[in-house]
Image: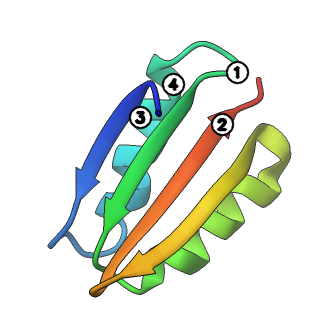
Amino acid sequence: MADKLVDARDLNCPLPILKATKALRSVAPGGTIELLATDPAAVRDVTALCESGRHTLVEQATTGGVYRFVIRRDV
């Protein structure tokens, strides 16, 4: 289970990634957040966020039009 849940359903780009970034700042290194989003752009944005080298995408799934990401803060 993630340390923090970020419900960004029904929000459009860039709000899901902005909320995720803010939540990641609020957890300690090694902590995780779970992001729920309905905007398809979130897939691209979360991938880019994790490729920056500061975070790791632990899990990704899509169910009923809801994208679910578990992201670990590395630094």
Q: Residue 35, percent across and down?
A: 40, 53
* Left or right placement of residue 69 versus residue 8 in this view: right
Q: Residue 22 carries which label?
A: 3
Q: Which residue is drawn at 43% across and 57% down?
A: 17
Q: Disc 4 or disc 2, which is closer to the eye?
A: 2
Residues tagged 1 and 2 counted as in contact (Cβ below 8 A): yes
* Left or right placement of residue 63 versus residue 70 in this view: left
Residues tagged 4 and 3 counted as in contact (Cβ below 8 A): yes
Residues tagged 1 and 3 counted as in contact (Cβ below 8 A): no
Q: Which of marks 3 and 2 is nearer the N terminus?
A: 3
Q: Which of marks 1 and 2 is nearer the N terminus?
A: 1
Q: Residue at x 23, y 51 (%)?
A: 7
Q: Distance between the residues labelled 4 and 1?
A: 11 Å
Q: Residue 30 carries which label?
A: 1
Q: For the residue labelled by badge 1, is the local secondary structure a helix, a strand or a loop? A: loop
Q: Which colour scheme is used?
A: rainbow
Q: How far apart are marks 4 and 3 (CA)?
A: 5 Å
Q: How far apart are marks 4 and 2 (CA)?
A: 11 Å
Q: For the residue labelled by badge 3, is the local secondary structure a helix, a strand or a loop? A: helix
The residue to which callout 4 is attached is: 25
The quadrant of the rendering that contains the C terminus is top right
Q: Three-letter amino acid code at disc 2? A: Arg
The residue to which callout 2 is attached is: 72
Q: Three-letter amino acid code at disc 3? A: Lys
Q: Earlier in the sequence, mark 1 or mark 3?
A: 3
Q: How far apart are marks 1 and 3 (CA)?
A: 15 Å
